[in-house]
Amino acid sequence: MLKLIASLTSPYARKVRIALAEKKIEYTLLEESPWDAGNTVSEHNPLGKIPVLLMEDGMSLFDSRVIVEYLDAVSPVSRLIPEPSRQRIAVKRWEALSDGICDAAATIVLEHKRPAAQQSAEWITRQQRKVTLGVAELARELGERSWCSGEGYTLADIAAGCALGYLDLRHPSLDWRAEHPNLARLAEKLARRTSFADTAPPPS
């Protein structure tokens, strides 16, 4: 059986966990964080990042984008990435934008963990700008459509939903719902899906 090394608060791991649920693929969750003392993440991913998918033949897959692409290819159930190249690129663009928002948001969290004298206000402001502009781009691209890309639920929705959920977890003061009601409607709809409800991160 597949094994997934993941943290319950990682938006990238959540993306993979949602994909596994949507594809109805069984796996064992191994909770681990690269920040915990004595963790074994680097034994499976030399970059020391999660999530990592451990294959039955001993091979490990990383990062989340590679893992989701593999999962979508290995099972025909609930295709998450369209086949036509133009539609595929559109969905992958959504994923890149959403992951980029998570990258910047996570960087802010890590910077705030440094001793106050070592923190860079300029660096934090730069990352905050990425988050603000990234979320605005999500809202602009979504417009009044029901789904992020195309006429149905795809990886684009999963990635965007995970990014917005991560902002709620780590940056609750950022009121993106008030500024972008279309994203709020999308998030509410996604939250009702079993895959999203079952992978909601624990309160910080």
Image: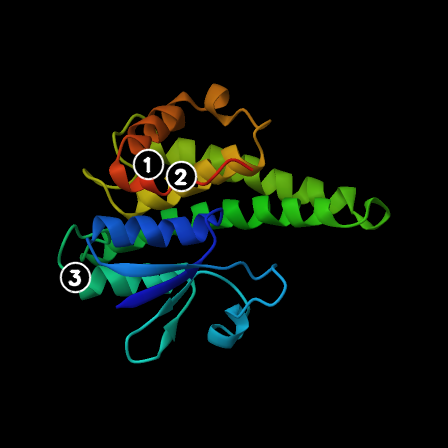
Q: Which mark is residue 200?
A: 2
Give the position of the N terminus as an image quadrant. Answer: bottom left
Residue at x 58% of width, y 44% of height: 105
Q: Which residue is mark 3?
A: 75
In the drawing, does residue 99 fall left or right of residue 81?
right
Measure the C-alpha gap from mark 1 to mark 2. 5 Å
Q: Which mark is residue 134?
A: none
Number of disc labels: 3
Q: Is tag 3's residue or tag 1's residue first in the polypeptide sequence?
A: 3
Q: Quick one: SS at disc 1?
A: helix
Residue 66 on image: x %, y %: 36, 65
Say if 59 sits above or below 20 in the image: below
Nearest the eye: 4 or 132: 4
The quarter of the displayed image where residue 16 is located: bottom left
**Mark 1 nearby-residue class (10 Å; few <14, some 14–19, many ≥20):** few
Say if 103 sits above or below 171 in the image: below
Q: Which mark is residue 197?
A: 1
Say if 53 sits above or below 78 in the image: below
**Mark 2 nearby-residue class (10 Å; few <14, some 14–19, many ≥20):** some
